[in-house]
Amino acid sequence: MGFKIAIAGATGNVGREMLNILSERAFPVSEVVALASSRSVGTEVSFGDKTLKVKNLETYDFSDTDICLMSAGGAVSTKWSPKIAAQGCIVIDNSSAWRYDADVPLIVPEVNPDAISLYTRRNIIANPNCSTAQLVVALKPLHDHAKIKRLVVSTYQSVSGAGKDGMDELFNQTRAVFVADPISNKKFTKRIAFNVIPHIDSFMEDGYTKEEWKVLAETKKMLDPKIRVTCTAVRVPVFIGHSESVNIEFENEISADEARDILRDAPGCQVIDKHEDGGYITPYECAGEDATFISRIREDATVENGLNMWIVSDNLRKGAALNAIQIAELLLNRRLITPRAAA
């Protein structure tokens, strides 16, 4: 017997990707329910060869639902996730609402699968920030081998990380440039077409942005609280795929060749690293792929035991929808959940 799955925020970029991935990976479902706000009720979304009509999240009864994949934003999750969890439905939340709660496990299955057993404290599991998810997939096997001391991360994040409105703004501004129409900014603080913006999320008192703080806090929670992390997050005019330039300082010696060999054998990683024209991955090539791609692995001679690398992944998949469904698969594989209908 399959599981009854609800997708909250089914009309958004990530919600639609969740529906696609559930179908692609043949997740054992008995029923899939698409949910959104009242203004989206009746909207049709695709699940495999089926068409689902969106229902109202606020009036839906979760008492017979096994898992809710929540992708409706932080404010909605803060309000509804505890209510859904109280009905016995496990919530896997894609927002930042629960990531820093000590009683909520923050999970990337390739990195810290054992932490999933803590979900019973609140019946909620948090999905990490899109830029952190791909980062820790690449860092975990290297940390296990040589112990990371310090990270310097610069992100190059696609506009899909800001939702459909972000993608629409890049498209509309790009078209406006070519036809000499006026350009307006609505979603971003400055023009994004043919530009980069060193500002994602709100500014904090120390001058860092909330997005940059997320990378720090989530890496420490999932990987090791002793790692020192600094980050600069940048929005770039790319539709799908986040890229990261990462400088790593290790406690123990590790060569670039050793790092390549370790990452080639690591779950979720794919190394494309040839020292030639085009011998690396760009966000264009990673769109629609599940792996975290690592390129430009090289030693940093300015610090002892230092490496540089380039990390790229589809932010809508591994950075959000795919990771959430891998968490659901982890629940099944560890027999932490059985279908409520069968019970």
Image (cartoon, rainbow, N blue to C red):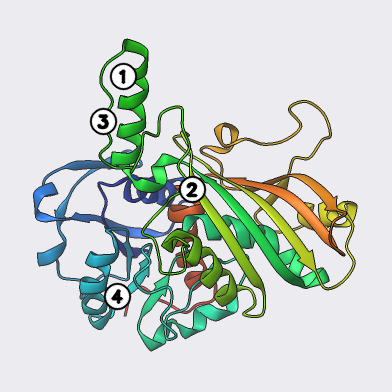
Q: Residue flagged by tag 1: what amino acid is it?
A: Ala
Instruction: Measure the C-alpha gap from mark 3 to mark 1.
Output: 9 Å
Q: Position of residue 26 (x, y in %)?
A: 46, 51
Residue at left 58%, top 55%? 134
According to the picture, the residue beneath numbered tag 1 turns out to be 176
Q: Where is residue 101 in the image (x, y as percent from the top left)?
A: 41, 81
Q: Residue flagged by tag 2: what amino acid is it?
A: Asn
Q: In which quarter of the image is residue 228?
A: bottom right
Whether residue 1 appears in this view of the structure is no
Instruction: Please state, as top left, top right, bottom left or bottom right, where the N terminus lies in the image.
Output: bottom left
Mark 3: give few (<14), some (14-19) or many (20+) Cα within 10 Å: few
Residue at left 28%, top 78%? 85
Q: Residue flagged by tag 3: what amino acid is it?
A: Ser
Q: Which of marks 2 and 4 is nearer the N terminus?
A: 4
Element under disc 3: loop
Question: Mark 4, mark 1: which one is toward the viewer?
Answer: 1
